[in-house]
Image (cartoon, helix red, strand yellow):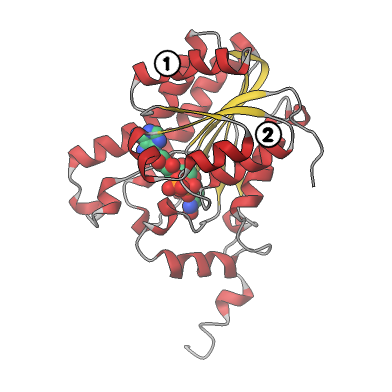
Amino acid sequence: MSYNLLKGKRGIIFGALDPNSIAWITAERVHEEGGKFVLSNAPIAMRMGQINELAEKTGSQVIAADATSEEDLENLVKKSVEILGGKLDFILHSIGMSINVRKGRAYTDQKYDWTQKGTDVSAMSFHKVMQTLYKNNAMNEWGSIVALTYMAAQRVFPDYNDMADNKALLESIARSFGYFFGRDKNVRVNTISQSPTPTTAGKGVKGFDGFISYAEKMSPLGNATALDCANYTVSLFSDLTKRVTLQNLFNDGGFSNMGVSDAVMSTFIGEE
Ligand SMILES: NC(=O)c1ccc[n+]([C@@H]2O[C@H](COP(=O)([O-])OP(=O)(O)OC[C@H]3O[C@@H](n4cnc5c(N)ncnc54)[C@H](O)[C@@H]3O)[C@@H](O)[C@H]2O)c1
């Protein structure tokens, strides 16, 4: 179903790697709602992924940018404004990576070079994206910037490892930069805290299969899918949410406010 909620709006969508990516599904939904955008991903991901298929399907251009490189981001923002024919209305930061997670290093045995790289990619890149947009005055008034996060920023999920700290920083950057973007440019900045979702990044977390089933059983509405996340993002890009800013918004079927559910309790019955 489409409501033309993003008709006439332009933006940049970071992080579509393959059809499972939350950014991929979001790009499809934004396209259906009438939004126009440039797709961006790291040069290496563009070689390995299928982003050109998505570009063709959505009539978009692709510009490679390593989100840790100020130079790449400067080029991306300037070219996007040119290509799309004006300033931007929406940005999706859907980028995350931890080498410690990928290589199975425990939280108590981190290799700090890897930790640093993960922080740079997963959190500091959000500051860099926003600073580039801000300094180039590239956002239209009442524009909307969204980054994706996970509840391990607030609560302990041991296997989420150093990504928990990266997400805490990401959410803090959203609030801090969101203040200046709101005050100076009437632009809103929020994070969506999404349920576990079977994507390349998601499945890289140890014990993901068990964890996604646990979250499903704990959440009264079940896990939010990538499509649910895409739809929520569309609402945040639309004019229907103009004064929602500095928020970390849970799109998780209710998981974050649960203590325990009947479904989870039933697995322990008979143990006392
Ligand atoms: N999948 C989940 O369970 C889940 C839950 C909550 C939040 N999230 C968040 O959603 C976002 C999207 O992840 P996803 O689950 O769709 O997985 P994904 O693997 O499809 O997307 C991650 C993206 O980050 C990109 N990326 C990595 N390094 C980069 C760099 N240096 N520059 C630019 N891009 C780079 C990758 O190429 C990839 O496209 C991430 O921030 C992730 O942490 C995911």
What residue lies at 49% left-to-right and 22% top-to-bottom?
Answer: 176
Amino acid type of the residue that numbered disc 1 sits on in the rendered structure: Asn
Ligand 1 - quadrant of the structure image: top left
Q: Quadrant of residue 142?
A: top right
Are the residues tagged 2 and 1 within 8 Å (C-beta)?
Answer: no
Judged left or right of residue 212, residue 108 is left
Element marked by disc 2: helix
Residue drawn at (37%, 57%) of the image: 205
Q: In this view, does 124 lie above or below 206?
A: above
In this rendering, the answer to whether 4 lies above or below 180 is: below
Q: Can residue 235 be seen in this view?
A: yes
Quarter of image, res 253: bottom right
Viewer-side residue, 242 vs 143: 143
Is residue 47 or residue 142 the one in the foreground? Answer: 47
Mark nearest the camera among 2 and 1 is 1
Q: Is mark 1 within 8 Å of ligand 1?
A: no
Density class for disc 1 (Cα within 10 Å; few <14, some 14-19, many ≥20) is: some
Residue found at the far bottom of this picture = 270
Q: Name the residue under label 2.
A: 236
**What amino acid type should be assigned to the residue bearing mark 2?**
Leu
Please tell me the numbered disc located at residue 75.
1
The span from disc 2 to disc 1 (Cα, nearest Å) is 26 Å
Residue 111 relative to residue 214: left or right? left
Placement of 51 over or under 34, stated as above or below: below
| Residue 150 seen in this snapshot | no
Rendered view: 157 above or below 2: below
Residue 45 image offset from top left, x and y in percent? 37, 40
Q: Which of marks 2 and 1 is nearer the N terminus?
A: 1
Circle 2 packing at 10 Å, graded few (<14), some (14-19), many (20+), is many
Q: Where's residue 119, x and y in %?
A: 32, 35
Q: Residue 175 carries which label?
A: none
Viewer-proximal residue among 148 and 59: 59
